[in-house]
Each structure stands twice: as structure tokens, then as C-alpha cells.
Image (tube, rainbow, N blue to C red):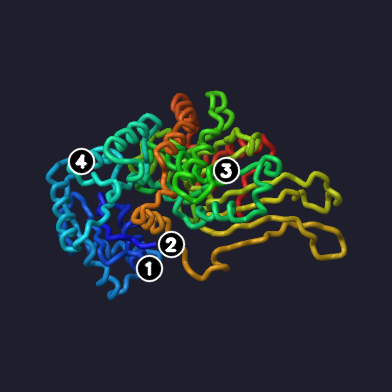
């Protein structure tokens, strides 16, 4: 895989995303030898900075946030000359003219026509104006060589997502549009497809005949921090379920694609979303619960409740926890519940998919031999632990026939010595290589919005919640336990 000459324009160059994720990722790609000699990063922002000041800033960010630790002077001297800064007001045509001139100058210097990637690491209200101005200034006319990367949130609801898709489609071809869902770039998430579709032994079991239910749980211990300004207009359903968790569900539930090409893979995922059962208002009451965290203590520290967070509305009804029970109405999954939950300020950070298989059809051992553990479970741990474990029953050593649950474990740390790239490294490289497999296609985003809309609407119409309803350091509101307990199950947590 070779990256062609590339100019990477980052709108929001002085913003948080660039500091924490993009700049460290680009630097690590450079370290790993992925970036070509003819490569430029142009950061843009409203602040007045010169190239050197911007480079210094990025150096600080990379030192702080890169997985590879402190930058070595020699590699920095190799990297820094590729970095430029341009002050810009994204609303005025003059700024785009200046981009055009910069790009032209690099083209001339390199003696080649590079690919140009425009990365919109800005608040969503700027997506339309930047996309439109890029097009108007003829900066993105060549679909072969120019691409636009859109961060989340992609729309605030179905209508706004559609509107944004329409606007983008006026100016860009779909093959130019890279909608980010950073979960898809995570190593362990990519491995779900490898695990499912490169192992023949799983497919015969991967259906309603053998699988009893599936849990997808993405719990976070952090609160909203200083993001309440955004989060208060969003909530857990929009922020996590509509995108990350539903994408995980698609990876678990999708049919085998014919090959590993972008549209084939994405078609199979859209099939899942289309097959998912739609909620009526009554279903929402039955199948979806929400919560908001109260003040409390975490790891010996006093922490504010959501309503007390900076920039949060003190009467906010925004949910910081959501749990939903979904069904995929097709032949493979009919009747198999998929329980999704996510929330902030929970006891532990853990993203885990659990596939619980049915019990053996007939059990020959005495009840007391089993400690009631009769299910096999496949536990795919995405983060922070990175592992896949298959839970089996086995005989406990001793003269009695007693059984125990044991784990067959594949863990990344014990198996590989190389550190995996961060999600953004993979995704940024893919944008440069022109591979859209791990990006959201327009119809995928809309299908996911379509699915969550009835829940959003119903929640909006029923604002009278007893918020806050879960304490910091817990596993969320009691109603989330009740949701799954009604079906005879409980939420799993890693040991
Ligand atoms: C983001 C959400 O998309 O994902 C955040 O906006 C959330 O609220 C984050 O904290 C979680 O990502 P990760 O990679 O830490 O699991």
C-alpha cells in the first residue's frame, strides 16, 4: 500500500480533536513510514499563528497525547517541515482562495498533482458552509483526487442528517465523502469481521438456533467533562447508540459479504439496519430506558452530577445513560434480543460484546454440579482489555464430577508484541489510500437515524423523568437491570 503525494487540510487545526487525535495519528503514521516524501499538513483556524508557532503547538500536543510517547528531536525535524498553518475564516471566499494558492504552490514545488483531503474537525454547524465553499472555490472538483472527511455528529436527527447528505451530494460524489465513526477504526472492532469471516467453525453457530441473546455494552467511567455544551443537545442515544453501538451490532449481525470491498461490506451492514424492528411508542416504553448521573464519589473523589457540570442546563433532561433492546427481523436473528447499553460515570470503562449461546439441550450432570453455569459465552472485549474469550464448562479437578466455567482466551497483549495503531491512524491512512470500507456511507447513517428516531421522539415527549436516577460509580439506573431481567437475563461485567 502506497500513499500518493497528499495534502491534508485540517479545518479546526487549533481545536481539540486535532490536538488529541489527528496530529498524534499523523505523526505516528509518519513514524511508521506510511507518509510519502511529498506530504503536507495544512492546519487552519481563526487564530493568527505562523507555521512555526503552529508546529510548536502540535509538538506539545503530540508529546502529551501520542501513544508512542515523547517525540524525538530527530524525527520531529523530519516531520515538522511538512506542517503549515493558514489563518482562515471559513465563511469568506478569500480564505479558500488562499488555500487554492497554497495547494498550487505545493503542486508546483512537487511537480505533481497531489491528492487533497479536507478534514472537517469543526463543530457541525460549519459542515455546510465549508463543504459549499470548497466546491464554489473549485477546490474539490476532481473526484479522483479530492476527498472530504466529516466528523460526527452527522446530523442531529433523521431530517438534519438527510439534509446534510443532500448538501454534500450536490458538491461531492459519494466516493469522495468519508464519514467518520472512530469505533470502526479500532483494532478490536476490525477484528470482529476477521474473527467471524475467516473462521469456518463459527458460522454454523451464528444464528437463532444457537444464540440466545447478544449484549453490547459500552460503559464509561468519565462524566461529560467540559463537553456539556454539546452533550446537552445530544445525549447518550445520539452520542453513542445511533453510531458506535449500532455499528458494533451490524458487525455482529451482518451476513457474510462476498468480498472485503467498501460497498459490499457496507451493503451488508445496511441490510442489518433495514431488518431491525421499528419501535412504536409503546415499544419504546417497554424496550428503552434512560438515565442521568447524580453527584457522588468515584475512586475517592467527589464528582458533580450531570446537571452540575459546566455548561449543562441545571434542569437538563438529557440522558447520560441509555439501554435499548433491539430485534433484527430476518431469518438469521428472528427472536434473538440484542441488548445495547451505554452510559457515563459508570463503575468502569469497558466496551464488551457478549454472545450468549443456548444451554445444552439435555444436561446429564446433577444440578449442584454446575453452579447454574450452563451457557457458553463468547465475550469480545474491545477496550480497555483487548481480548476474545470463549466461556466453556469444564470439570473441576477432584474426585467429584463438579463443573466450572473456564475461559479460552485470545488476548492481544499476550499474543502480539507490536502495539496496535490507534483508530485514527487507521482511518486517516484509509482516507489517504482511498479506502472507504471503515467509513459510514450516507444511507447507513440515515438508516441508523431512522431506527432511533421513535425513541428520541418518545423521550422528547415524555420529559418527566426522575433525573438524576443513577449514582456515580454504579452500573446505571435500576430500570436498565429491569429491562433485561424481564427476559430472564442480566448485564454481564468482566471479572
Ligand atoms: C465519542 C463520544 O464519539 O466517543 C464521547 O462523543 C465518548 O462522548 C467517546 O466518550 C468514546 O470513545 P472511546 O474511543 O473512548 O470509547
> Could you say whether the residue bearing mark 2 is in a helix, strand or loop?
loop
Residue 207: x and y in percent read 66, 42
In screen coordinates, is 145 left or right of 494? Answer: left
Does the residue tagged 3 have its C-beta within 8 Å of any atom of ligand 1? no
Determine whether label 2 and label 1 are within 8 Å by CB.
yes
Residue mark closest to the camera, 3 vs 1: 3
Q: Residue at x 56, y 51 (%)?
A: 352
How much space separates mark 3 and mark 4, taking CA atoms? 40 Å
Task: Decide: few, some or many residues near mark 3? Use Cα within 10 Å; few <14, some 14-19, many ≥20.
Answer: some
Q: Nearer the viewer, residue 372 or 274?
A: 274
Q: Are marks 2 and 4 in contact (CB under 8 Å)?
A: no
Mark 2, mark 1: which one is toward the viewer? Answer: 1
Disc nearer the start of the sequence (2/4): 4
Residue at which label 3 appears: 255
Viewer-nearest of labels 3 and 2?
A: 3
- Where 440 sits versus 56, above or below? above
Looking at the rendered image, the disc whose residue lies closer to the viewer, 3 or 4, is 3
Q: Which residue is mark 1?
A: 32
- Number of numbered discs overlaid on the protein picture: 4
In the picture of the structure, the residue carrying the numbered disc 2 is 421
Can residue 19 be seen by looking at this rendering?
Answer: yes
Residue 283, relative to residue 375: is it above or below?
Answer: above
> Disc 1 and disc 4: Cα gap in Å?
34 Å
Separation of disc 3 and disc 1 at Cα?
A: 34 Å
Q: Secondary structure at mark 1?
A: loop
Task: Give residue 423's position: percent from left, percent from top.
Answer: 42, 56
User: Mark 4 sits on what residue?
Assistant: 133
User: Could you tell me residue 412's position as x and y percent?
Assistant: 55, 64
Q: CA distance from mark 2 to mark 1?
A: 10 Å
Q: Earlier in the sequence, mark 3 or mark 2?
A: 3
First in residue order: circle 2 vs circle 1: 1
Mark 1 nearby-residue class (10 Å; few <14, some 14–19, many ≥20) = few
Amino acid at each position: 500500500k502506497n500513499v500518493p503525494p497528499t495534502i491534508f487540510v485540517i479545518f479546526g487545526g487549533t481545536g481539540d480533536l486535532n490536538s488529541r487525535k489527528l496530529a498524534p495519528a499523523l505523526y505516528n503514521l509518519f513514524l511508521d513510514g506510511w507518509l510519502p516524501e511529498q506530504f503536507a499538513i495544512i492546519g487552519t483556524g481563526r487564530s493568527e499563528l505562523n507555521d512555526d508557532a503552529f508546529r510548536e503547538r502540535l509538538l506539545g500536543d503530540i508529546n502529551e497525547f501520542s501513544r508512542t510517547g515523547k517525540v524525538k528531536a530527530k524525527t520531529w525535524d523530519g516531520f515538522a517541515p511538512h506542517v503549515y498553518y493558514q489563518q482562515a475564516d471559513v465563511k469568506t471566499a478569500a480564505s479558500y482562495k488562499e488555500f487554492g494558492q497554497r495547494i498550487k504552490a505545493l503542486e508546483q514545488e512537487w511537480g505533481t498533482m497531489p491528492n487533497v483531503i479536507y478534514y472537517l474537525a469543526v463543530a457541525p454547524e460549519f459542515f455546510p458552509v465549508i463543504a459549499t465553499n470548497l466546491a464554489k472555490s473549485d477546490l474539490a472538483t476532481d473526484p479522483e483526487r479530492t476527498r472530504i472527511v466529516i466528523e460526527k455528529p452527522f446530523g442531529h436527527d433523521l431530517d438534519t442528517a438527510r439534509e446534510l447528505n443532500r448538501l454534500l451530494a450536490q458538491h461531492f460524489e459519494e466516493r469522495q465523502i468519508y464519514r467518520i465513526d472512530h469505533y470502526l477504526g479500532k483494532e478490536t472492532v476490525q477484528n470482529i469481521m476477521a474473527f467471524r469471516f475467516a473462521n469456518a467453525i463459527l458460522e454454523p453457530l451464528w444464528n437463532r438456533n444457537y444464540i440466545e441473546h447478544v449484549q453490547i455494552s459500552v460503559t464509561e467511567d468519565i462524566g461529560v467533562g467540559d463537553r456539556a455544551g454539546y452533550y446537552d443537545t445530544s445525549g447518550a442515544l445520539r452520542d453513542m447508540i445511533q453510531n458506535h453501538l449500532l455499528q458494533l451490532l451490524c458487525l455482529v449481525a451482518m451476513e457474510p459479504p462476498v468480498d472485503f470491498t467498501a460497498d459490499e461490506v457496507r451493503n451488508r451492514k445496511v441490510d442489518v439496519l433495514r431488518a431491525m424492528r421499528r419501535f412504536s411508542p409503546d415499544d419504546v416504553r417497554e424496550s428503552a430506558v434512560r438515565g442521568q448521573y447524580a453527584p457522588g464519589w468515584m475512586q475517592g473523589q467527589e464528582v458533580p452530577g450531570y446537571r452540575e457540570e459546566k455548561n449543562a442546563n441545571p434542569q437538563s433532561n438529557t440522558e447520560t445513560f441509555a439501554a435499548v433492546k433491539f430485534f433484527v427481523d430476518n431469518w438469521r436473528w428472528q427472536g434473538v434480543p440484542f441488548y445495547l447499553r451505554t452510559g457515563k460515570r459508570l463503575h468502569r470503562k469497558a466496551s464488551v460484546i457478549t454472545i450468549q449461546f443456548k444451554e445444552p439441550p439435555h444436561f446429564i450432570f446433577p444440578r449442584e454440579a454446575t453452579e447454574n453455569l450452563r451457557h457458553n459465552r463468547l465475550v469480545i472485549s474491545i477496550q480497555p482489555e483487548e481480548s476474545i474469550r470463549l466461556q466453556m464448562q469444564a470439570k473441576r479437578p477432584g474426585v467429584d464430577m463438579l463443573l466450572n466455567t473456564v475461559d479460552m482466551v485470545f488476548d492481544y497483549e499476550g499474543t502480539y508484541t507490536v502495539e496496535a495503531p490507534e483508530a485514527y491512524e487507521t482511518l486517516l491512512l484509509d482516507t489517504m489510500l482511498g479506502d472507504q470500507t471503515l467509513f459510514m456511507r450516507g444511507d447507513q447513517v440515515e438508516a441508523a437515524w431512522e431506527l432511533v428516531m421513535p425513541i428520541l421522539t418518545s423521550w422528547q415527549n415524555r420529559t418527566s423523568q426522575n433525573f438524576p436516577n443513577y449514582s456515580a460509580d454504579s452500573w446505571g439506573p435500576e430500570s436498565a437491570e429491569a429491562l433485561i431481567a424481564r427476559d430472564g437475563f442480566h448485564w454481564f461485567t468482566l471479572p
